[in-house]
Every structure is written in structure tokens, then in C-alpha cells.
Amino acid sequence: MDEHPAFELELRRALAHFYDPVFLNQSPLIQLLCLENEANPAGALRNAIEQGIRSLQPDPATPPTSPRQRAYHLLFYRYVQQLAQRDVANQLGLSSRQLRREQDRALQALAAHLRLHSVQPANAETRQDEEANLLSQGINREMSWLRHSLADGVTQVQPVLKEATRLAEPVARMHRVVLDLAPSDEAISASIAGTVLKQVILNVLTAAIHGVPDGCIAIASQVAQGHVVVSVRSQARAHGSRRPPEQDGLDMAARLLDMFRGTLRVSAADLLVQVDIVLPQAEQMTVLAIEDNADTLQLWERYLEGTRFHLVGVRDPDQAFRIVTELKPKLIILDVMMPGVDGWELLSQFRHHPLTSRIPIIVCTVLPQEEVAHALGAVAFIRKPATRQVFRDALAQQIEASEQER
């Protein structure tokens, strides 16, 4: 239990008004955390709390179901992302009562961290060094979170190009640059989350705009040798008017792409600069879920929205073998307790039939029988209820393992 209840109470109040600068300006936490001399005390308090939340994130290798991972994600979803309690509970697979207990423990850990790090820096130089270090740590954690949580994203490229171009238009007009987006196949998809791809393109476009004032920029996408290539081709108006694209934007785009097996290529000649965004082309993968509970199937479908996985649900286990041989899925998710046919019998049948023996099978059940599942031939085991991250990670790991065996 927290030995400083007044501090924790003020922290709870600040979190309840996390994006209200008027309320935060009046919070006693500003003095308790030595922030009263900041130019923007409310903003400094919000940043301190957010950095405190991010500091609780354990190493990405820590299991998603661990108490430390849940504490970090609970605080991040609830206060930084401002999700409702019900949505947070669904994300983490917790009941309302469990969520309240976990939230109390997470808030106590956050309060302890903030008190421990509330000592004011000795001088301005030390303060600047610490702020730079915190900023670097925050960026690294954000990148780690993006890589971990959005690893299975799949995006149709052309709609994202349209949105990023629309967002860049006001900047282009300021610099008298014409943006020209070429039509392309709307079905072209890349293995990257849409939100990340949009930021990559926006960074490249704004960097290019500053390099060709009064010029024009042509944007196009195509598929080449199993990759999606988005080309941003900048042309200056006249000799001497072209400048190098802003490096900060290109560096950030390259860093984001690197996490999703993408690359950035830059070439220049005379009045032209071309930046190519190269991404793996997405391959849609069929996952067959043998599960008699319709609500569970709907939950799993939501878990896999926007990913490379296409979930096909089978509620009648008697039809499962026929459907498996017809669809030839990349992966099977199998419940155990189903009416009529026992899941263990299905698992053995799949493992010993030549048409299905090589399809990876993940057993997903409320039963604590992981050892039995592996002994009967399952490649992985998920204990219900499973969070979105646990569920998606299990699928991704098995697909990667099967691809490496080819």
C-alpha cells in the first residue's frame, strides 16, 4: 500500500483531468515534483506523468500477460490514449473487478516512481542532459511499442497515400509546391500498419516539399518483385532552386520503416530528387478457428482486424475436417470443449492425416492443459481469456516459424 496517500490522491486527480491544462495548473503535484519554475507547468506535469507511465514498460521480451506488462498497458490505454474502462478491460482480457484491482496497483507503482524521481536537477546543464535523455528514452519506448503492437499490420497503400497527400497539401501550398498523386490499384497492400505508413509518407512528403520550393512532386505506387514501392519524385523549377530534402523527416521515415522490414532509398540528379519507400507486399493468410462460441469468434475477428490474417470460423466441429481440407489454412486455432466432438480427438485426427499433418495447430481453451496440448501435437497453447496482443503474437510466431522451415 502507498505510504503517501495524499500524493497518490493528487496523482489520481491529475490523471482524471490529464488533458485539462486549467486543472493541472492548480495541482499540488507541480510543487511536489519541482515543476513550478517551468514555462508551462501544466504541460511539464503531464509530460512527467506520461514519462513515468512509459518508464514502467518492461523489456519487450517480457510476456504480455505478466503483471508488469498489464500495469504499463493499463495506464497507457486508460490515461495517455484515454480509452474507456470497458475498452481497456476488453483489450487486456480482464473483468471490471480485476481491472480496478490492477489499476490500483499500477497507480501505486506510478506514484512511487514519480516520488523517487522528483528531485530537482542541480543546475541547468544537468537538467538539459536529463531532459534529452528522457526524450531519447521516450522515443525508444514508443518505437518499441509500435514494433511490438503493430507488427502484423496490413494496409491498402493507395487510400493511405491519398490521406497523407491531403495532410501535406497545406504545407505544399505555403511553399508553392504542386502535389500530384497518380492513380493506382486500390487493392495493393503492404505489410505495415496504416498509421505507421501514413506517418512515413507524410515525413517524406514534407521533407521533399522543403527541398523544391515552387516545384512539383509526383507520388506513385507499384508492385515490383514482391515489394510495394511508393515513389516520391521531386522536381525543382530551375537550377539553383533545389535543396536537399530535410534530413530529420527522412531519418524518422527510415527509422519507422526499419521496424517493419522496409527501406528508404534516395537518389538525386540535376533538378530531380527521388525517394522510394520500399515495403514487403502483404500476403493474406487464412486462419481457421474451430470454436462453437459465436461471441469468441467475433472477438477473435476484432483482434485480427487490419492484420495479414483472415479468420474463418467453424462452429460445427463435425464439419471441421472437410473445411480444413478445402481451405488449406495456414494455421488452425482449436477449442477443446465443444459439443459432439472432443477437441483432443480432432487434434489427433489432424495430426495423423496426411492432408492436415503439416498445418500448425494452436489449442485455445480455458483448461490448464498446455502439456497435453503439446504432447498431442499442438505447436502452441493459449489460455482463455486471451488479450489481443497474446492472441496475435501466438499466430505471428507460428507463421514465422513455418516460413523459416520452408
Image (tube, rainbow, N blue to C red):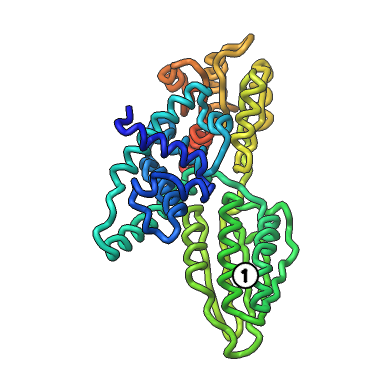
Q: Position of residue 262 (x, y in %)?
A: 52, 58
Q: Position of residue 101 (x, y in %)?
A: 44, 25
Left or right relative to 341: residue 134: left
Which residue is denoted by mark 1 in the rendering? 232
The kind of residue tagged 1 is Val
The residue at the far bottom in this view is 239
Q: Nearer the viewer, residue 44 or 95?
A: 44
Residue at figure coordinates x 45%, y 49% from the top left: 46
Question: In the image, is residue 4 above or below residue 338?
Answer: below
Q: Position of residue 324 (x, y in %)?
A: 64, 27
Q: Where is residue 282 in the image (x, y as percent from the top left)?
A: 61, 49
Residue at figure coordinates x 68%, y 17% from the top left: 316
When asked about the image quadrant of residue 159, the answer is bottom right
Q: Nearer the viewer, residue 180 or 11?
A: 11
Left or right relative to 136: residue 385: right
When asked about the image quadrant of residue 299, the answer is top right
Q: Nearer the viewer, residue 155 or 242?
A: 242
Q: Nearer the viewer, residue 383 or 347?
A: 383
Residue at figure coordinates x 61%, y 58% from the top left: 228
The answer to whether any part of residue 358 appears in the image is: no
Q: Quadrant of the N terminus?
A: top left
Q: Could you say whether the residue bearing mark 1 is in a helix, strand or loop?
A: strand
The residue at the far top in this view is 340
The answer to whether any part of residue 181 appears in the image is: yes
The residue at the far right in this view is 183
